[in-house]
Image: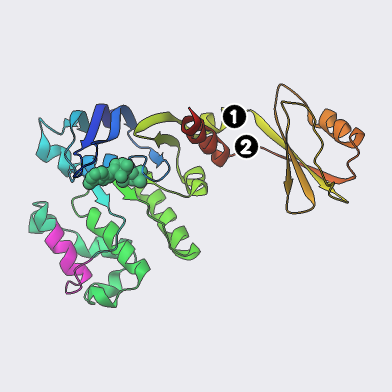
């Protein structure tokens, strides 16, 4: 088994210029490794290049230059093997309304050249909880069922790597939980999973390694714990009896922000101050402090810091 499920080197994508426009450099010579066996999160603001990246892996977008290895197979040298090693669950819920789930899986298996005796359509449908809908028309399926069917389709050729593009966008909490536990099961059984998500709490809960893409560049790629540990920002939240008209100035390295009418958040760097000092300063500045709480940084803070820093650069 390869050490990395995916290895990407100097991957570049330039979309041709629209009439009267300039070409768009959507991926800027990126290097990225996805370790075998991981649940890998790909995060980034809209337009960062995530779909372009995934679509290149899936063979749906042609790269401009660079190399892509999937399960050790170079996309240019071994296109068949590299394609057979990956399954992609698209974002849109487009399904042919005249196919039944069983029929859709059989057609997909045919496209991937899975011989009849090797097919496991019914077993896969059972696994995603669609066993009793195997012969229903796709147009009668709910949104959640369609999403599960798309996952089932991506699994017909038993790919080593499964990519899910925004798997839980717009789904309710119950289905989200179900999808998460299903993804965990697949991962525990050996599938490497890559998911893109807008929901940072999803990445925080699901992923063991995370890459952040911004403006076509990888601005971070680390184990989740290291990524979150990178920020040494701390927040002390003061609940105040009365919100002052103007917020006190507690020094240039302390950010003071009012929240929801009765809380003031003081953000500071761990080395530069301590919560007891700050509390004393705040009280000396005349704040009527009724209660306090501290907050640790989370993935959202890291994400904002890494993506905003580039905006202003
Ligand atoms: P994300 O998935 O992170 O939102 P995309 O990969 O869709 O980002 O887009 C990256 C950049 O490439 C964006 O600026 C987008 O407008 C541009 N882009 C995406 N697809 C095309 C295309 N087919 N033609 C031209 N530009 C495109």
Across and down, in percent, residue 128 comes to: 33, 62
Q: Which residue is mark 1?
A: 231
- The answer to if 107 sits in the magenta stretch is yes
Query: Image point 48% across, 35% down: which residue?
Result: 307
Establish if 33 lies above or below 48.
above
- Reply yes or no: does residue 76 show up in magenta: no
| Label 2 sits on residue | 297
Image quadrant assignment for residue 139: bottom left
State whether residue 61 is above or below residue 152.
above
User: What range is drawn magenta here?
Assistant: 95-108
Q: Say the numbered circle drawn on residue 118.
A: none
On screen, residue 274 above or below 24 = above
Q: Which of these two is toward me, 176 or 213?
A: 213
Which quadrant does the N terminus fall into? top left
- Marks 2 & 1, CB-CB < 8 Å contact: yes
The kind of secondary structure element at disc 1 is loop
């Amino acid at each position: 088994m390869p050490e990395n499920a995916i290895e990407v080197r100097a991957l570049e994508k330039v979309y041709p210029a629209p009439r009267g426009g300039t070409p768009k450099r959507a991926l800027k010579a990126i290097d990225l490794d996805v370790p075998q066996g991981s649940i890998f999160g790909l995060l980034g603001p809209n337009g960062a290049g995530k779909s372009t990246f995934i679509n290149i892996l899936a063979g749906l977008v042609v790269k401009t230059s660079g190399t892509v290895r999937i399960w050790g197979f170079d996309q240019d040298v071994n296109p068949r093997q590299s394609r057979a090693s990956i399954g992609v669950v698209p974002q849109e819920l487009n399904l042919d309304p005249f196919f039944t789930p069983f029929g859709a899986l059989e057609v997909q298996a045919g496209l991937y050249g899975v011989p009849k005796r090797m097919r496991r359509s019914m077993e896969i449908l059972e696994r995603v909880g669609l066993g009793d809908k195997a012969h229903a028309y796709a147009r009668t399926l709910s949104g959640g069922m369609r999403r599960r069917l798309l996952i089932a389709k991506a699994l017909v050729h038993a790919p080593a790597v499964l990519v899910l593009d925004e798997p839980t966008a717009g789904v309710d909490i119950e289905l989200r939980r179900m999808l998460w536990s299903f993804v965990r099961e697949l991962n525990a059984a050996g599938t490497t999973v890559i998911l893109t998500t807008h929901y940072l709490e999803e990445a925080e809960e699901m992923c063991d390694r995370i890459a952040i893409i911004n403006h076509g560049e990888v601005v971070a790629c680390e184990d989740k714990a290291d990524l979150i540990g990178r920020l040494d920002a701390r927040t002390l939240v003061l609940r105040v009896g009365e919100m002052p008209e103007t917020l006190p100035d507690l020094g240039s390295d302390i950010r003071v922000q009012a929240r929801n009418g009765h809380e003031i958040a003081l953000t500071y760097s761990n080395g530069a101050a301590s919560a007891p000092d700050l509390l004393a300063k705040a009280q000396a500045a005349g704040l009527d402090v009724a209660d306090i709480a501290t907050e640790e940084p989370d993935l959202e803070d890291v994400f904002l810091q890494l993506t905003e820093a580039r905006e202003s650069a």
